[in-house]
Image: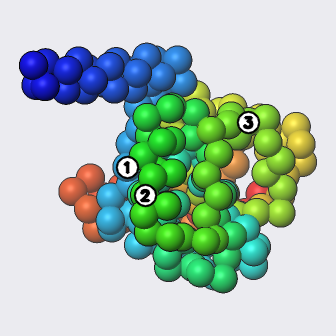
Amino acid sequence: MFEFYLLIFLLLIVLTIVISSLKIGISPMPSSKAAQKKILEYAKNSKDETIIDLGSGFGSLAIFLAVNLPNKKIIAYELSLVPYLISKLLKSLLKIKNLQIYKKDFFKEDLKNATLVCYLYFEGMKKLEKKLFDENINTTIISNTFSLHNIKPREIQYAQDFFKSPIYIYLT
């Protein structure tokens, strides 16, 4: 009987993730360790005291940055309930003090005065670019895999992972 309830619970979790993914436009996609290391290289040299992870998923990148950049404030935004809860649990278990995790739509938040880190999707990048222009946000953007459309990257690096993930560096 326990197995039945566990199976129902797991199916509800998967269903919640699927519904959120369809609503948001992308499923939670963790950055590879190699991509995380490339992103860290740029984030640690950022002049900004705050780094914002846009669409943080299960929190792997935000947690990695918070642990490796203890003097910077890391903010993570995630809309999907299950990844949000898991990242909050991991933050608590690891006792990370410089990380704040919010279940909010980052498109409705103030993104000024922070380095932005993202692993979005085609439509998400278009929407982010519009927000940057509309709100006149000038900052460093570090994007895993997906590029902005009308802003030329200052630099492109490739992670040493299976996909040779491109890491785009922008200074808008």
Q: Which residue corresponds to mark 2?
A: 90
> Which residue appears at 67% of the width and 76% of the height?
72
Q: Is residue 168 visible?
A: no
**First reached walking from the N terminus: tag 2 or tag 1:** 1
Q: Label 1 amino acid?
A: Pro
Which element type, helix, strand or loop, lies under badge 3?
helix
Q: Label 2 amino acid?
A: Leu
Q: Give 170 or 109, whichever is nearer the viewer.
A: 109
Q: Position of residue 126 (x, y in %)?
A: 65, 33
Could you tell me how far apart the alpha carbons at marks 1 and 3 are, in whole angstroms?
20 Å
Could you tell me how far apart the alpha carbons at marks 2 and 3 are, in whole angstroms?
25 Å
Q: Give 97 or 38, whichever is nearer the viewer.
A: 97
Q: Which residue corresponds to mark 3?
A: 107
State which quadrant residue 16 falls in.
Answer: top left
Q: Position of residue 21 (x, y in %)?
A: 44, 24
Q: Position of residue 90 (x, y in %)?
A: 43, 58
Circle count:
3
Q: Which residue corresponds to mark 1?
A: 30
